Amino acid sequence: MGAGAVLFAVTACAGQGTPAADPAAKPELSTSASVAPPSPSDIATPTPGRPKQVVPEGTTEVPAKQIDSSALPADYPRDVTTSNGGTVLSIRAQEGGCGRVSAAVAEQTAQRVVVNLKETKAQTNQMCTMDIRTPVISATLDAPLAARTLVLTVEPR
């Protein structure tokens, strides 16, 4: 019984010292590491490229009356914000399965801006899910949107 008690005591105290290197153990996250917060320009100016799921902070909502979305399907999102002085549009779009949505500025006049939304699908014969995602994509204008009408269109696939 004495050997059993010693073995129990050693086993119980093993977790109180420095842990042994265990390759299967998950590393602990340190909260003391110093990570610089993003600068205001990083937050306020979305960068063109991969879609995001959230609208960046520091954006201004484009009023619904300023958006001509008559060419969009009835169930398509119609949320648009601007940033970077009104020259960057963040548009809530729609994609699904193996598709990826993108935005292209097709026209910029003194009265209106036309942005074509296009979903590109993979050219392989792979199986795709039937989900619908609504990422936020960006488009950059030559001049601020200001009071111009924003026309959203969807290019055929």
Image: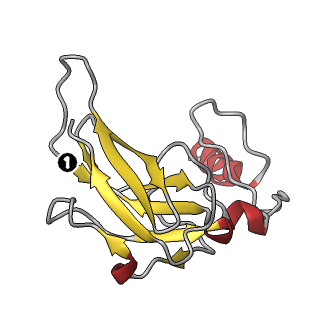
The residue lying at 72 percent from left, 60 percent from top is 42
- Quadrant location of residue 27? top right
Q: Residue at x 63, y 47 (%)?
A: 11
Visible residue check, residue 94: no
Q: Which picture quadrant has residue 36? A: bottom right
| Above or below for 145 versus 52 | below
Is 85 displayed left or right of 108 in the figure?
right
Determine the image quadrant of residue 20: top right
Q: Residue furthest front?
A: 110
Q: Amino acid at mark 1?
A: Asp
Residue 44 seen anywhere in this rendered image of the structure: yes
Residue 67 position, x and y percent, is 36, 72
Q: Answer above or below: position of 156 versus 86.
A: above
13 vs 109, nearest the viewer: 109
Q: Position of residue 10 (x, y in %)?
A: 68, 47
Which residue is identified by label 1?
131
Q: Is residue 146 left or right of residue 42?
A: left
Colour scheme of the picture: secondary structure
Q: Is residue 155 above or below residue 56?
A: above
Identified at 69% across, 48% down, the residue is 14
Q: Nearer the viewer, residue 76 or 156?
A: 156
Q: Secondary structure at mark 1?
A: loop
| Residue closer to the observer: 15 or 38 | 38
Placement of 77 over or under 5, stated as above or below:
below
* Residue situated in front as seen by the camera: 13 or 151: 151
